[in-house]
Image (cartoon, rainbow, N blue to C red):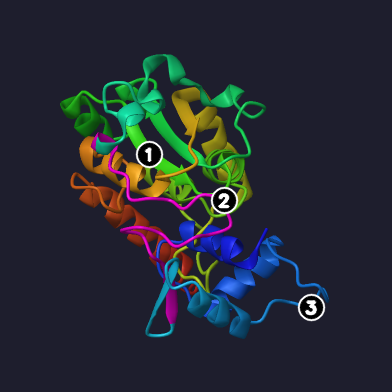
Amino acid sequence: MTLHLAMEQVLSTSDEPLTPGEIAEHINTRDLYLRADRAPLAASQISARARKYPGLFTTDDGRIRLVTLGAHAPCATAAVEQAMPVDAVPNLTPVNLPLLNEAGFRGAGGVDALVPDAPGLYAIRVREFGHLPEPFRSEAARRNDRLIYIGEAKTSLRTRFLNQELRARGHGTFFRSLGAMLGYRPETGSLIGKRNSRNYTFHPADERAIIAWINTNLEVSWIPLATGIHDTEVALIRRHGPLLNLQGNPRRMAELSRLRTLCCDIATTAASVKG
């Protein structure tokens, strides 16, 4: 994997822009990129690479974020992703988009050997409204829509969708939101001293319980897609307003934002010392 692709992968799984040092730490910890001399990646290399690819990254107040709207500059994939709203792509209209076809969904517990190591889009829905806690259950029933999340995998559906979002191997945005919705909370102070104050995780026993809930109650679909990944995801989220999408969602739920903030507060607050 090239360095700028590794940077894309880190930033695509973060809820906020990151400093060069934070990005370097994520890449080093997750072994996403190795220097020829095997030395740890330095923050200065991240800054230099961001400047080299202004079509992919932008820097504000010392923090780097992905360029998410408009055309993208060439990246590690062979093709250049073009701005591609759903309505502009003949094979990806809301009527025949394979991602949301009924036949494309299958139980989340039986997909580990099926999800490809390729870029693409994924969708997640609940089997029955009654499996959701309130107020999400009532809102899903009011909308009469079991779809709860749409996401993108810029490099690998297996890494982003399967491993991070469904199996808690890394920092999955959907997994954090789902856990918070189900009532799980991170350990108090678990993010103190960590560079990213939003990538909270749950206790391993809680993670196993969340994964078991996923396997029992969710259905998933995915499609490999070489170009237009981000713009298609944005258009779909705007069109469908899935229950657990926050960014770019015109029907985002305030309760989910509250729960996510609560989890961040718990993870960044020192435990009280009993006398």
Helix, strand or loop at disc 2? Answer: loop
Q: Earlier in the sequence, mark 2 or mark 3?
A: 3
Left or right side of 186 for 168: right
Look at the picture and state if 124 lies above or below 153.
above
Rounded to the nearest angstrom, the CA distance separating label 1 from label 2 is 25 Å
Label 1 amino acid? Ile
> Which residue is painted at 50% across and 57% down in the image?
186
Left or right side of 262 for 201: right
Dot 2 alpha-carbon crowd within 10 angstroms: few under 14, some 14 to 19, many 20 or more: few
Q: Mark 3 — residue?
A: 39
Rounded to the nearest angstrom, the CA distance separating label 1 from label 3 is 37 Å
Q: Earlier in the sequence, mark 1 or mark 2?
A: 2
Q: From the image, which quarter does the N terminus lie in?
A: bottom right
Q: Position of residue 24 (x, y in %)?
A: 61, 74
* Residues rendered magenta in the picture: 63-87
Q: Mark 2 — residue?
A: 78
